[in-house]
Image: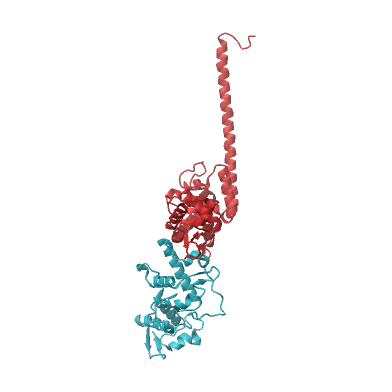
Amino acid sequence: MATAASTAAPFPFPSTYNFPPFFTPQPNNTTRHSQLQKWSSLIQAWCRHHRTYRLSLVDAVDTPLFHNAVLRKRLDLGEARAIVDWMTKSEEQGGGGQRAEWIVGAAAGGNAAPNSVAWIWWRRPEEWADVLTDWIDATGQRGVVLTVFELVQGEATVSQEFHGMDVEVMMKTLNVLVKRGKAQVFGNDGGEGVKFF
Amino acid sequence: MSRRGVGLGAFANRTQATQSFATHGANLRSTHLASLQTQLSVFQSLLHTFALEHSSTIKSNPTFRAEFARMCNTIGVDPLAASNIKGKNGRRGLGEGGSFWTQILGGDMNDFYFEVAVRVVELCRDTRDENGGLIGVEECRKQVRKGKAIGSGLEVSEDDILRAVRSLEPLGSGISIVHVGAKNYIRSVPKELNTDQATVLEVMQMLGFVSVSMLRLNLNWEKARAQTVIDDLLADGLVWLDAQGPEKEYWSPQNLLDDSG
């Protein structure tokens, strides 16, 4: 689901990407751990570069992310799943710090196979919430009512990182703010508005 | 015929002669010593002036620094040894208070190597997972030069890195230098490499990777031997496995460094 900005600069791959064993699950535990970390940061960087929030693994295995055409190495679906699965776990569970989250009953294309689409949190909703709060503060919009559409697509946010954000991610972010008592969301499907405190 | 003198007087003469020879010898020796001492102190002061004059170059230019350190070594002044006996009197009478380097450069040189050492240790720790605790000095140098934060890169030579690592030895930190083939490595996990392992690492220096059949063909090893060596290296995390080719290939992670963290 690379909603790629095709005109943008090409993604700068790290040197690990050109290291053939990177595409084979490593048998040594320590090495494996390092490999997972490198994959995790590569996936996050890739998604950030392409402003991708949800990553469909079935589609992604054929993109350059998981398929290095020059080396003719690829990451198969099972391995990609294993990596994203590792990313979903917290560090206490020996995972990658919850940098991904499986989307259950994925709406993408109707192929509802479990563990095939995931949110990639190059920023977690909590982190997005901070970004949003900073922006609200910086622009003096406390107490102002904004629609979610304005936040995501409005002209005022073009320069912001959350511009063009997946609406679901925005809702998750706003929910974090609601829990923190920093915002109130009202309205319903498609017409949500939000007020920041 | 009686020039030598016969009779009892000769004995007295002879003792006298020996005595005067001895005093003369002692005189000679002391003047010699004195002149040597002056030479040495002149040399020391020249070294001081030189180091002071060029202190900024010594600090900033790695080649120059290495040359200077080598010069000190040739004449028997070990800058590192001298800087390690901080506070106590210098071994070669150089330091009345503080070490050779501290005296000359105001502690900068000590600090410089310690700073390099800290970075080396950090790097070794950060990359231990990916390279099994073995890192090429050259790769290490590149990393230290780059530095993690902006403006924190240090211009260093291989020589500096080696010195820095050696300066850690008194701490018993378990970090040491290993020579394999044409390269120096920093070993941060205390473990010995056996000859076969070293050989395989050497092959990997040239080709980047090895496989069992390569080892069998080029080194005439039996299959079991080649496999054992590789398995050992794999278990230590010193090589990475690539199973997507026609034969399993084992790659050295030495070129991976630039994106860690």
Shade representing chain B: red
- In the image, residue A170 sits, relative to residue B46, either above or below, namely below
Q: Residue at x 59, y 28 (%)?
A: B28
Can the viewer see residue A133? Answer: yes
Q: Residue at x 63, y 11 (%)?
A: B3
Q: Residue at x 46, y 47 (%)?
A: B87
- Count the marks: 0
- In the image, residue B136 sits, relative to residue B8, either above or below, namely below
User: Residue A122: x, y in percent?
Assistant: 45, 75
Color scheme of the displayed model: by chain
The reply, left or right, for residue A178 in relation to residue B244 is left
Quadrant of residue A188 within the rendered picture: bottom left
Foreground pick, B122 / B59: B122
Foreground pick, A118 / B73: A118
User: Residue A159: x, y in percent?
Assistant: 51, 81
Say which quadrant the C terminus of chain A sits in: bottom left
User: Residue B62: x, y in percent?
Assistant: 58, 54
User: Residue A189: x, y in percent?
Assistant: 39, 90
Foreground pick, B225 / B2: B225
Which chain identifier belongs to the cyan chain? Answer: A
Can the viewer see residue B163? Answer: no
